[in-house]
Amino acid sequence: MKPAGTINCSEPTTDALLTALKENILGKTEVRPVIYPKTPTNISVSFILYGILDVDEKAQLFDSYIWVNLFWNIEGLSWDPVECGTDRISLPREQLWRPDIVINEFMDENKVPDTYYLYVQHTGNVMDDLPIHVISSCNMDIYTFPFDIQNCSFTFNSYKLFAVDVQFSFLEPVEETLKNSLDAMQTKGEWELVTMLAEKPTLLPEELNNAYDTLIYYMVLRRRPTMYVVNLLIPSCFLITVDLFSFLLPPQNVDRSSFKMTLILGYTVFLLLMNDLLPVTGNTLPLINVFFSLCLALMVASLLETILIINIQCGSCNYGPLPRWAKVLFLNYLAKLVFLSKKPSDQNFDPEEHRTENKRCDPVVDTSLSEAVHNSTPTVQELRKISHELLSIRQQVDKHFKTDESADEWVHLGEVIDRLLFGMYIIFLSVSFITIFAIWLSWYGKNTSVV
C-alpha cells in the first residue's frame, strides 16, 4: 500500500473520493489491511445488550439481542477532509476486509436483517456496527429457583486468525458497557441485568502462533421471583396450613379423612397445572421441587395418621382390654405431656364396686331374703327365681360396664396419639420450612454480595 496521506481527490466530492478509494482499498478483501504481514491488526470491541429475550433452563440457552461495535485501522489509508470534502464515508461491507469475529457460545443462526454499510474515517479507522440475535449456551444453576442468579458469558474471538495476526481490545470500560446496556434495555420481562464483568485472558509469547486472542464478557442475570412466589409458594403454604388446622377436626364426629383426601387431590391438580412454570434440567434438583415434595409428603402422612386414629377409635369396641404398658406409657405419661389427662373422678370410678356398696347398704333386701329362706312357700320359690334373673342381669350389666371402660381407654389412646402426632407435625413442618427458606435466603444473599 501507499504511505499515509497519498489518497488525493480531484475535487471535494463523494465521487472523487470513491474513485480514489477504488484504486487503493476497495475490493481488496483477501488480506489484512497492513503494510507488513507480521504486523497484527488491532480490533476494538464493544457491544450493547438491547434485550433479554428468553432464558431456557431446560436447554441451557440464553436468548438475547445485542449490537456489536468493531473498530480497526486500515494502514496506509488517509485523506485530507478539506480536499475530499468529508472526513468519513460509508462503504459497502463486502468491499472491505472485515475480521471474522465470532461468539464462541453461539448455538443457532443469526436471524436479524442484513446491514450493508460501514464507516471509514479519513484517518483510516473503520467503524462497523451490526446487530446480532444471540442464542448462546449458558451453564445454569437453578438450585435456588425462583431466587436464582445466572452468569452467562460472551467470548469474542476470531474464527480462523490466530493472535499473531489479530488481537482484540476493549473499546470502553465494562462499566460503560453496562450503563449503555441498561439505558438501551427495552425488555422488562422475567430477567434483569444486574451487572457485567469482562476479562481478557493473557497469552504467552509462544502461544501467539497457535492460540486465539479472546475477550470475555460475563453478564449476571437475576430472575424476578414475584410471579413464582404468588403462583407457587403462597398457594402451597395456604394448602399446607389448611391441612395443619384440619387436625383440630374431631375424627369421631367429622370425616376428617375425606377432607384430607380432598386437599391431596387439589394439591396434585395444582402441581400439574403449575408444572410448566417449573424448570427442568438434569444438572441439579431445584430446591422448590423439594419444597413441593415435602408439602405433598406431609399431607399424605397426615392422612395416614387420620386413618390410624379412626381405626383405633371406631374399632375400640372390638378390641380387648388395653395392655398395661400402653396404659402407663400413653395414658399416664404421654397424656400429661400433650395435656389430655383424664379427670381423677373418671379414672377411679369402678361401677362394680359402686354396685357392691349399694348392695351392702340395702338392709331391706337382706332381711327379705333371710325370711324367705325360713318360709318354704310358693312365694319363696318365686323370689328365688327372681333372684337368679337379677343375678344374670347384673352379670350382663357388669360385662357392659367393663366393655365401655375398655372402649373409653382405646378412645383416649387415640386422642393422645392424635395430639402427639399433631405436635410432631407442627415441629417437623416448622423446622423443614425454616431450613428451606434459610437456604434460599443465604444462597440469594451470598450471590447478591458476590455480584
Image (cartoon, rainbow, N blue to C red):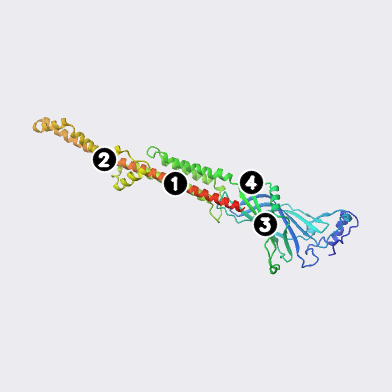
Residue under numbered circle 3: 198
Circles 3 and 1 in contact, beta carbons < 8 Å: no
The residue at 56%/54% (across/down) is 281
The residue at 29%/42% (across/down) is 406
Q: Which of marks 3 and 2 is in front?
A: 3
Disc 1 crowd, CA 10 A, few/some/many (<14, 14-19, 20+): few
Name the residue at the bottom extreme. Answer: 206
| Quadrant of the image occupied by residue 214 | bottom right
Marks 3 and 1 sit apart, C-alpha to C-alpha, by 48 Å
In this rendering, the answer to whether 336 lies above or below 121 is: above
Name the residue at the front extreme. Answer: 449
Marks 3 and 2 sit apart, C-alpha to C-alpha, by 84 Å
Q: Is residue 393 visible?
A: no
| Quadrant of the image occupied by residue 415 | top left
Residue 189, label in figure: 4
Name the residue at the right extreme. Answer: 10
Using residue 272 as the reference point, say whether residue 197 is left or right of it: right
Seen from the viewer's position, the closer of residues 367 and 381 is: 367
Residue under numbered circle 2: 402
Disc 4 crowd, CA 10 A, few/some/many (<14, 14-19, 20+): few
Circles 2 and 4 in contact, beta carbons < 8 Å: no
Residue 427, label in figure: 1
The type of residue carrying mark 1 is Ile
Marks 4 and 3 sit apart, C-alpha to C-alpha, by 24 Å
The type of residue carrying mark 4 is Gly
